[in-house]
Image (spheres, rainbow, N blue to C red):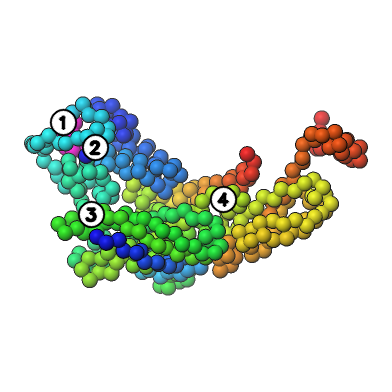
Amino acid sequence: MAAKKPEEITGAILDEESELTLGELCRACGMPAEQIIALVEEGIIEPRGARTRWRFSGICVRRVRKVYTLKRDLGVNVAGAALAIELLEEIERLQARLARLESGRD
Amino acid sequence: MEYKDYYQILGLERDADQAEIKRAYRKLARKYHPDVSKEHEAEDRFKEVGEAYEVLKDPEKRAAYDQLGAGYQSGQEFRPPPNWDQGFEFHGGGYTEADPEAFSDFFENLFGRGGGFRHYGHTGGARHRFHAEGENTYARIAIDLEDSYRGGKRQITLKHSVLGADGRPEIKERKLNVKIPRGVTEGQQIRLAGQGEPGLGDGKPGDLYLEISFNPHRLYSVEGKTVYLKLPLAPWEAALGAKVQAPTPDGPVNLTIPPNSRDGSKLRLKGRGIPAKEPGDLYVVLDVVAPPADSEPQKEAYRQFSEAFEFDPRSGLGG
């Protein structure tokens, strides 16, 4: 097969300001709506707006995916996955601080 | 094909009971889960552990595997003996939700592609299998902080599964040139529409999600949108005030250091952090460095220092 020059593609950032509908979030995460709703009820993701017009921020995609893989791979339930995610995010924050405080001190 | 010692992978003796197998798997799965572990090869280890468990947790597969004998070393060239699985019947129910595409050739040769088509059709929910939308795919990339300031290009290589001519999924490598959008921060994802798995039939392809992390930087550290620079100062610069030049990811800036600046204090450069829609700030953290006194004039200067100040750095210690 002849080597094709790879095409150049531009991505869109999913951040706090991007807004996804429930349907878009389901598609993005590859999960049915019932499971997304269960995560809202657990407080793992917090949509803005009334229930019929929920809008999810872009960072929800990452959280929902993590819940899904943790549940699948480690056999934890939604509450356990929620706890793990909050602790992991706390560790990430602490590691970033630690890296800053330790920088240049070698 | 290389032999895999599934007992060794899980750290078990060959006579381990099922409860021990489960315990060993759970422990290692938690340790190496790619969302949990920061270890470099965590993902490969995690797959290996999952594959070992897939075989050993199922008494049928375990018995068949045991029958191959204990005489092989991990990584040794291996061919299954003819009719090795004669007399064993594998029931479909024994597969976990582990991703079967992650399994090794060794596994596939022995047990086939377990549940291989679980992969298709579950994204689309009730959609008809032959017109299913492609799966979304997820990957991580590490970029430099400067890429987020200026926008950058990265070539990434993805392992991609396609449906081969024989109707079975096969793994192909795919190179993509990705433009990194300006202002992206660590942990955010970028979505590349239509770059996931191809759809089946008329189904649209899925999207590719790239999770961003930053390579460690020699000068800067980053927390969210906020960037920190440690700026070394001489004691007299900190005490008397100074105009100094400091690097930023946007290029050097001239800074005015106010008199009597203390070690560790921060100067905020508003909006000079990561250029998101609401840009982050850049903090310059002052790092006062005292030079060593090597020559006689230098020692004399320090002596004059101590005479000029009535300064007891340990006055706060009490005692």
Q: Identify the magenta region.
A: B56-68
Q: Quick one: label 3 or label 2, which is nearer the N terminus?
A: 2
Q: Which residue is mark 3?
A: B170
1 and 2 marks on the same chain: yes
Nearer-the-camera pick, B3 or B99: B3
Q: Position of residue B200 (x, y in %)?
A: 22, 65
Q: Quick one: label 1 or label 2, which is nearer the N terminus?
A: 2
Q: Position of residue B236 (x, y in %)?
A: 82, 47
Q: How far apart are the two marked residues, 1 and 3, measured between alpha carbons?
A: 29 Å
SS at circle 3: strand
Query: Which label lies toward us, 4 or 1?
Result: 4
Q: Quadrant of the N terminus of chain B?
A: top left
Q: How far apart are the two marked residues, 4 and 1, measured between alpha carbons?
A: 52 Å
Q: Which residue is mark 4?
A: B217
Q: Residue farthest to the bottom?
A: A53
Q: How far apart are the two marked residues, 2 and 4, measured between alpha carbons?
A: 39 Å
Q: How far apart are the two marked residues, 4 and 3, measured between alpha carbons?
A: 38 Å
Query: Which label lies toward us, 1 or 2?
Result: 2
Q: Which residue is mark 1?
A: B67
- Asked if residue A19 lies in the magenta stretch, the reply is no
Q: Residue farthest to the front?
A: A2
Q: Quick one: label 4 or label 1, which is nearer the N terminus?
A: 1
Q: Quick one: label 1 or label 3, which is nearer the N terminus?
A: 1
Query: Amino acid type of disc 1?
Result: Gln
Query: Amino acid type of disc 3?
Result: Glu
2 and 4 marks on the same chain: yes
SS at circle 4: loop
- Check whether the beta carbons of the residues at disc 2 and disc 4 lie within 8 A of each other: no
